[in-house]
Image (cartoon, rainbow, N blue to C red):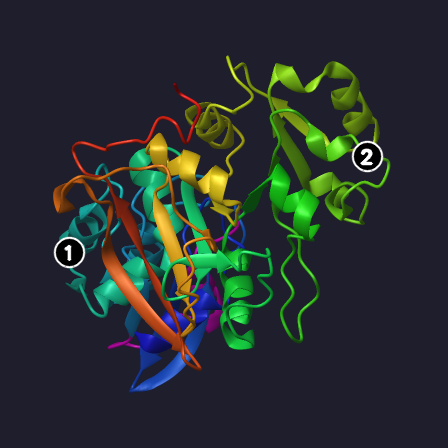
Amino acid sequence: MRRALGLARSVWGTTHPNPMVGALIVEDGQVVAEGATAPDGGPHAERLALLARGKPPRPGATLYVTLEPCSTQGRTGACTDSIIASGIKKVVVGATDPNPAHAGRGYAVLRAAGVEVISGVLEPECTDLNLIFNHWITQGGPLLAAKVATTLDGKIACRTGESKWITNERARADVHRWRRLFPGIAVGAMTVLKDNPRLTVRQEGQPEWCPWRFVFDGLLRTVVDKSLPSVFTDEFRDRTIVVTTPHGGLGYVRKLREMGIKVWIFDSPTQRVLLPDFRKKCAEERIAGVLVEGGAQLIAELVRVRQLDYLFAYHAPVIFADEKAKSMFSGLRPEKLEHAIRLTGVQHEVFDGDMLMRGRVAYPEKLLVDETVFGLR
C-alpha cells in the first residue's frame, strides 16, 4: 500500500477535480503492473494497472489500490466492472470513497462477485492524500485554504516591514509542493503591490508551473500605476484572474481584459468581495481548491465570514517579542477559550527546525468579531 501511495503522489495536483489514486497488481509476492490516475477524463488507476499487465492476471493475484474502486459508469466506466472482468479475486483498499452516495458500494459490488475485499490499510494516509477531493465531493465546492509563515509569537514581519525570510529554505520549498497540489493560489492587492510575487510553482528539476492566480482587489489598486505587477505582464498572465467589485471602475476592468487578464466582478455594498460568492464561482468553474497566501487582511476576512476551510501554518524558531511587529491573525475578540478557532485532523512536519502544522479549521459556535477592525462600525 505504501508503494501504491507513492504512485498516487506521482500524479500530485494533476487529476482535479478527481482524486489521486495509485494501484498495483501483485502476483506471487511480486509487483507486475502499476497505474496512477490520469488527468480529468482519463482512465482511473485500477484500469491503467490492468492495462499495464497486458494479459489476464495469474490466479491468486491481488490488486492494491489507495481508494475504494468506483462502482458507477461515469466517463471511463466502473472500475469494479474492470476488476471483476479481469478475474482478480482479492482487492486491498486504503480509504473508503468519501462520497456518501457511493461509500462502501464498490466493496459490496466486488464481494457480490466473489472478490475478497480488505479495506482500511493505511487509511489515514490514503484519506489525507486527497484532502481537496474529499472536500469537493462532500461539500460540493472548493477547499479554501490559507498558508501562513510566522515566528513563534505569530508575527509575519518586523515593525519595519522586513519579512524575507522568516522560514528556512526547506520550509519554503515545501510551500511550492503544496502550491502544486492546489489548482488556484490567491493573494490580496497589497501583497501584490508590496511583494510583486510570481505565484508560480518552482521546484528543482521541474519546469515552472502556473496555477490559476487570483488577485483580490476590490478597488483595482493594482492597475493604477504604469508599472504593473508581474502577474499581469509575465508569460502566464492568461492564468491570472482579478477578483473585484463594481467599485474598481470599468475603465480598469477593460484595461485588464485587453491585456488578456480575466476579471471576475462580484456585486458588493463595499470594496470587499463577498467570499461566499467567490466560492460559488470557483465551484461553477470546477476549480476544486484555492490556497490563499496573503495578505493578513484577506485571511482575516476569510475567518470572519467562516469561509476558511483549512490552514497550513509554518512556524520558525524565531521570536520578535515586539507588539508593533505585524501579526498574522487579527479581527476577533474571544472572551473564553470556547470562543477560539481550532484545527482538527492536525498533521505535523519538521523542516530543519521549522515546523508545519496543518489541519481543518473548526469554528466555535459563537465567533466574536472586533467590528472596528473590519470597518463594520
- Residue 97 in sight in this render: yes
Q: Compared with residue 185, is residue 25 higher up or lower down, i.e. above or below?
A: below
At a point 73% along the width and 45% down the height, the residue shown is 231
- Magenta stretch: residue 377 in it? no
Disc 2 residue type (three-letter): Asp
Determine if residue 54 is in view: no
Q: Which residue is mark 2?
A: 225
Against 106, residue 10 (above or below) is: below
> Tag 1 or tag 2, which sits nearer the N-term?
1
Decide which of 75, 282 is in the foreground and name it: 282
Query: Where does label 1 land, which residue?
Result: 111
Q: Give coordinates of residue 179: x percent, y percent.
A: 54, 57
Place of residue 157 in the rendered image (x, y in percent of width and height, measured from the top left): 53, 58
Q: Residues within 10 Å of mark 1 (few under 14, many from 20)?
A: some
Residue 193 place in picture, x, y as percent: 69, 43
Residue 23: image location, x then y, percent: 38, 67
- Tell me if 241 is positioned left or right of 21 in this view: right
Residue name at image x 32 percent, y 48 percent:
70
User: Dot 2, how many residues are within 10 Å of its Cα: few (below 14), some (14-19), or many (20+)?
Assistant: few
Of residue 134 and residue 63, the one placed in the foreground of this image is 134
| Count of number-bearing discs | 2
Distance in Å between CA atoms under marks 2 and 1:
65 Å
Residue 49 among those drawn in magenta: yes
- Judge left or right: residue 94 versus residue 260: left
Give the residue type that dot 1 points to.
Arg
Left or right of residue 159: residue 49 = left
Q: Magenta residues, as a range?
A: 41-61
